[in-house]
Image (spheres, rainbow, N blue to C red):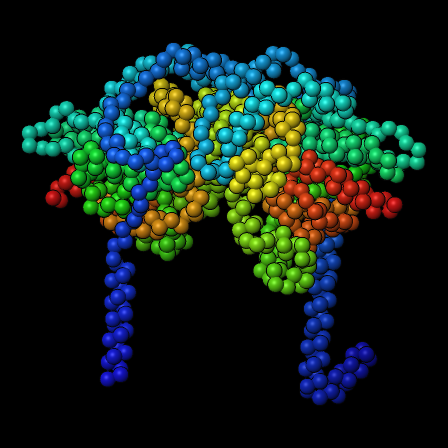
Amino acid sequence: MQTIEVLKQAISSLDPTQQQQLLVAGSAVAVGGLLTCYYWVYQGTKAKRIPIGGGWWGAGEKPQSEDEKVFPFQVQTSDEEIQDLYDRIDRTRYTEPLEDAGFQYGFNSTYLKKVVSHWRHQFNWKKQIAILNKYPQFKTNIEGLDVHFIHVRPPHREGQRVLPLMLVHGWPGSVYEFYRILPLLTDSLDSLAFEVICPSIPGYGFSEAPRKQGFNSLAAARVFHKLMERLGFSEYYLQGGDWGSLITTNMAQMKPECVKGLHLNMLTSKLRGFGVLFSILIGRYVPWLVGFTREDVRRLFGSVGFMERNIYEIIRETGYLHIQGTKPDSAGCGLNDSPVGLAAYILEKFSTWTDFNNRDLEDGGLERKFTLDDLLTNIMIYWTTGSIVSSMRFYKENLKTNIDNRLDNNTGVYVPTGLAAFPNELMHVPQSWARDRFRNIYSYSYMPRGGHFAAFEEPQLLADDLLQFVKKVEKL
Amino acid sequence: MFTEVLLALVVGGVIYFLVQRSKRHQLKSEDGWWGEGTPMDGEEDLSIRPYTVRTDDEELEDLYRRIDQTRSFPSLEDSQFTYGFNSHYLQKVVTYWRHDFDWRRQVEKLNKFPHYKTNIEGIDVHYVHVRPKNVPEGVTAVPLLMVHGWPGSFYEFYRMIPLLTEPSNPDDIVFEVVCPSIPGYGFSEAPHKKGFDSVCAARVFHKLMKRLGFQQFYAHGGDWGWIVTTNMAQLEPKIIKGLHLNFAPPSKPGLPVVLSIMLGRSFPKLFGFNEHDIQRIYPVVQNLVVESVKESGYMHIQATKPDTVGRGLNDSPVGLAAYILEKFSTWTDHDFRNLDDGGLTRKFSLDDLLTNVMIYWTSGCIISSMRFYKENFSKGLDQPHSKMPVHVPTGFACFPNELMHTPKLWVQQKYRELKTFTPMARGGHFAAMEEPELMAQDIQNFTKMQEKRK
């Protein structure tokens, strides 16, 4: 009571201007205080994890008990399989490309003939299988699906610390993308090495395809957590690109207590929200104001401008995403009969997503960063397992409900995160945008070269970045 | 003095502006050359050669072998046609194709109308030319050009042709019909150079009709045929006596279209909307945006990477059939997506559907047919012809299950001389093949009205 009286007297003793100033200052403090309270409350209640859920994806009804055994697996082939492939290749009905078209209309048929000739006469599938089998492989049944994975333990070295790591591939890749990086992670003389698990996403390669609708990245995340649990791991690191990036992110959101660190080489941005749009408008002129580095500006705007580099290029390159996200069975049906069709469809991505400029080249620049043997081995995984249709369905399962509204898209990621930004990745996401979702970024690296298939194309760069990130998390 | 000069200038300016606007812009087009390499010097080959569709044992054996070696993949449980062509039903179609479909008999059927080929701008253009047998005394048959679309062919018009060239009603007009194949489709040679878009096709077809001796003619089209015939009307409005369409999505939604979308539900009469219009347009986001996105994946990939997406389809007859027949299911009625058999045989016979697929298979034209999308869309949607209105008398047949519904107001924005607008009783995108009687009747009505005006 008394304090109010004192206050009243103090205020009335001020002259009008001073009273006004006091009013303004007081309102500002009040509003600021309210906003802070609201923000604090909002942040506090904003979910820090997503529900784990459950599922059953095998044919028919779910049985009473689940089979938890882990079986060793070896990739095999037969003369029959190889002869059937050759018969089909020999019966390919080519169409001449348009004159001077390069790779602008898709995979150039003239160059395709060269690739196919190598496939038919030089590529040795049996030799490649021996390479595939040099790492121990297994299968185990989770939620009704036989999940295939590679498990590599590093040789014992004195004083070397070993940490568990899962690498997840994407489309149109496979576990084979990691074969060049695996030795760098498991067989190094560094103080730190990894025990690596590389699963095949269900519906890809040697993992069984779901029979029921709805198998999206959240389901894959849960299945992979169960896999690690079954193998006896309680804490592990995750690395992924393409679909692997989304799946590992979901894993970090589902069970953050199991994920020691998350390393990604591909990000997407919603390109929404006031902050992002504002930064697009003025970021080129005052980058420091919106948290852009010079490198960000160079990669986002380039010499052609934001719209061209990001919007138009994305439209030009996402036809496959559109058709696979709506009619996967129609899109994939023919590819399962025609090995050359399958090769053209998949290898077009290895050309264009490594460098957009490859579209103007007659040979799509394919052999600049990859060997034909490596590329064809990846194709053979899709061909021999007949998994192209199920691999495409993953797009529809993830895109059929508006992905923007999905819970995981509106939930943050709080585990230690490392981001490797490769210059020729499909879309550049600056750290200031990534922070919207990834709340605990330990490292953000501008890689000097490389595109979408980073692990396949620049394994040393990726391994180095992963290692420095893990060391930061482990405080080494 | 000063004010008079100023006033004169202003009035002059206004008149000039108005005259400029009302001046009918004509679409311009330059000659092209689409053959291999560079054109040879010398006379252009203007000959018209009769053509017969043929097949042989080798072709059939190769087809059967490929069908037998199909590696099918089961559809997800309970997915019907929502993920694309359902594998269980595909198996039934393929069994029929392998054991019951008689391609030789279908080839005979194809040959019952005379076919020809002629070389225009460096490529062989194929067409069917049907002259009516019984033309009444003192009457000349009315020439009519019919252009197909994707994934169709000239074969879509086969049931309609007799209704037009030999109408049962003596009061009906007797037509002389020309059905060409768009270059890159069916038996027409595919262009070897980049840039062959709808305006080029329109110019080529004008040359064809001129070569056949027609000074004036009517034109009908749906799907790509719509744009090609519209371009023909824009290139030479005096030659096209009348334009009949069953598909005309607005290329540039102007103010009237936008306003009608915003206010049409509350004030239908103001925009001439009937109940069917309301049903097809609203809710707007669901019907105009979501449905389009769901169904335009093929368009997106064909407009960007045609050589990639068509590659496998040229080796796998079953893959080709699944890709093409999915459209004959979904574009006939969207609800067919929820049926196990895609409702395919409700409106079409398997023989007719497979004949169309065989035209794509035997000619190996799937890739070149897809390139047409890239040629037309890659320069952007803002082409000169899409901004230009059409001043040729037009008739529009509005089928209830067409892919994109266009009420009268929308069609009128581009087609400034819309003479008939007929809401049809039933039918979808492939109207000529699905409802030939209804379509033929509407063409008759429209043409009669035009001919009487003379």
Q: Which of A408 and B282 is in front in this view?
A: A408
Left or right of B232? Residue A54 is right
Confirm whether residue A317 shows in the render.
yes
Position in image of residue A113 (x %, y %): 52, 26
Kindly indicate the quadrant of the structure image that contains residue B239.
top left
Position in image of residue B212 (x %, y %): 20, 33
Position in image of residue B31 (x %, y %): 31, 42
Vertical position of residue B176 compared to residue B385: above or below: above
Residue beneath the point at 62% across and 33% down: A367
Residue beneath the point at 77% across and 24% down: A135
Kindly indicate the quadrant of the structure image that contains residue B246.
top left
**Quarter the C terminus of chain B occupies:** top left
Which residue is the extreme one toward the front? B41
Left or right of B430? Residue A436 is right
Please state the total of marks drawn on the protein image.
0
Vertical position of residue A278 compared to residue A418: above or below: below
Residue beneath the point at 33% across and 32% down: B123
